[in-house]
Image (cartoon, rainbow, N blue to C red):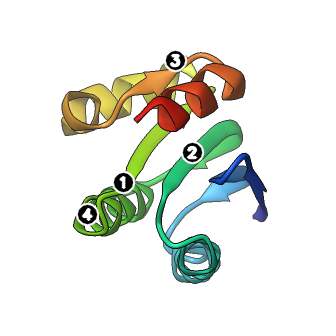
Amino acid sequence: MAIDASVVDGVVLIRLKGELDHHVVEQIRNEIESALELNRYRGLVISFSGIDFMDSSGLGLILGRYRTMTQHQGKMVLCEVSSSLQKLFELSGILKIIPVFASETEALAAVKEA
């Protein structure tokens, strides 16, 4: 599992690559939280373009970051979600609370508007 964290126009952009499962979720959560703290929780975009597999711990990671962002009045969106992950997000109810965009550019624009 690899994570690329960067800040684009005041928004934390996280690119995940590999398998997001219970073996790596704590490390990923810690890295995201560190980036958010440095950026004062203004905005978060998570890109799933490089995710090959995700289990329920990945859902917990997403929902936990969403809760953190809303507590700090920040905005969070997801992007570049494969069709299989889209189904998982739909079944879990994530799509009802977190917007999903086709590209990083659209996702970053949506967070900056808020």
Work out whether mark 2 precedes mark 1 in sequence or the reverse, and give the earlier one.
2
Task: Assess disc 2: are there few (<14), some (14-19) or many (≥20) residues with their C-alpha within 10 Å of its C-alpha.
Answer: many
Q: Which quadrant of the structure image shows residue 27?
A: bottom right
Mark 1 vs 3, N-terminal side: 1
Q: Residue at x 68, y 41 (%)?
A: 52
Q: To which residue does mark 1 refer?
A: 59
* Quarter the N terminus occupies: bottom right
Amino acid under disc 3: Ser
User: Which dot marks residue 45?
Assistant: 2
Q: Which is closer to the viewer, label 2 or label 1?
A: 2
Q: Alpha-carbon neighbours of circle 1 within 10 Å: few (<14), some, or many (≥20)? A: some
The 10 Å Cα crowd at callout 3, few under 14, some 14 to 19, many 20 or more, is few
Quarter of the image that includes the C terminus: top left
Q: Which residue is mark 3?
A: 83
Instruction: Please name the residue that numbered disc 4 is placed on.
Output: 67
Q: Amino acid at mark 1?
A: Leu
Q: Amino acid at mark 2?
A: Val
Above or below — where is 53 with respect to 39?
above
Q: CA distance from mark 2 to mark 1?
A: 15 Å
**Cα–Cα gap, marks 3 and 4:** 25 Å
Residue 81 visible, this angle: no
Q: Secondary structure at mark 3?
A: helix
User: Separation of disc 2 and disc 4 at Cα?
Assistant: 14 Å
| Residue 67 % position (x, y) | 25, 63
The label shown at residue 44 is none
